Amino acid sequence: MTERIHDRLFAASGVASVALMLAGVVIGSTGGRQFVTVTSSPSDIAAAIAKPVGTAAWAGAYLEVLSFGCFLAFAMWACTMLGGGLLGQIARAAATSYVAVSLASLAVMDALAYRSGHGIGLQLGTALVTFNEALFVMTWFLSAFFLLAVGPLALQAGRRKLGWSAIAVAAIVLVLIPVSLDNLAQMANLLWLLWIVAASVALAGRAPARVGVVAPARS
């Protein structure tokens, strides 16, 4: 019973990580947080850093930090549920790196938001935006690496839908990053979030039945 409760809590962490991240983005935007990228024009960046952000922007950033903690708990549990081993170690390393780089990206954007409206220059603002974009794109690669490790692990555990969907999402992300960085690749990242939710629900359910050969009883 206790183990079952733990499984549900970790599964809820996966769903919560996505919910908190999306809520953080929405709430942050209401506080004046700007989401400029490397393709933004100098005038757009200048407008983004011209005025200070509101309290809601910091509330949104706080929720995003919490979301990465929830994701890390989910990722460690998912690897254990699927059997661990070498693939599990690779997946755990990718998940840990994903969280670390994501938090670094969030810290850069928070630094930019903190200085916005307080005399930050366009050159420094553009540099911070570019640095953040580089970190953000790295998180896409790390999420794909996690999926490429978890996918085969799930297939070995008999969870075919979970495994093949992980591999498919990873392939889509890796293909679209060089094709369309600020458009299709951004949308592909939503598939990653959907996979987390689907995996949380699937792993919280009963394990798939394994079909095997029954050994003959010894006399």
Image (cartoon, helix red, strand yellow):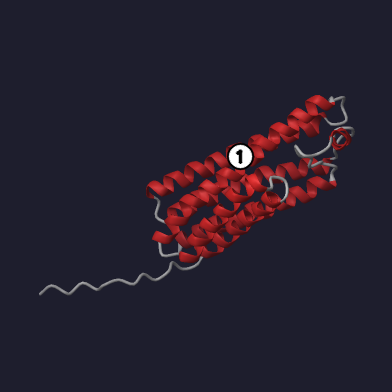
At x 51%, y 46%, the residue is: 145
Q: Percent x, y for residue 115?
A: 81, 28
Q: Is residue 187 above or below residue 66?
A: below
Which type of secondary structure does the marked residue at label 1 adopt?
Answer: helix
At x 59%, y 50%, the residue is: 175
Residue holding disc 1 = 138
Q: Is residue 128 left or right of residue 207?
A: right
Amino acid on which disc 1 is placed: Met
At x 56%, y 64%, the residue is: 201
Can see residue 157? Answer: yes
Please state which of residues 56 and 93 is positioned toward the viewer in this rendering: 93
Q: Percent x, y for residue 177?
A: 63, 46
Please state which of residues 41 and 141 is positioned toward the viewer in this rendering: 41
Q: Which of the image's four quarters has the C terminus?
A: bottom left
Crowding at mark 1 (Cα within 10 Å: few <14, some 14-19, many 20+):
some
Can see residue 67? Answer: no
Q: Is residue 146 left or right of residue 88?
A: right
Q: Quadrant of residue 40?
A: top right
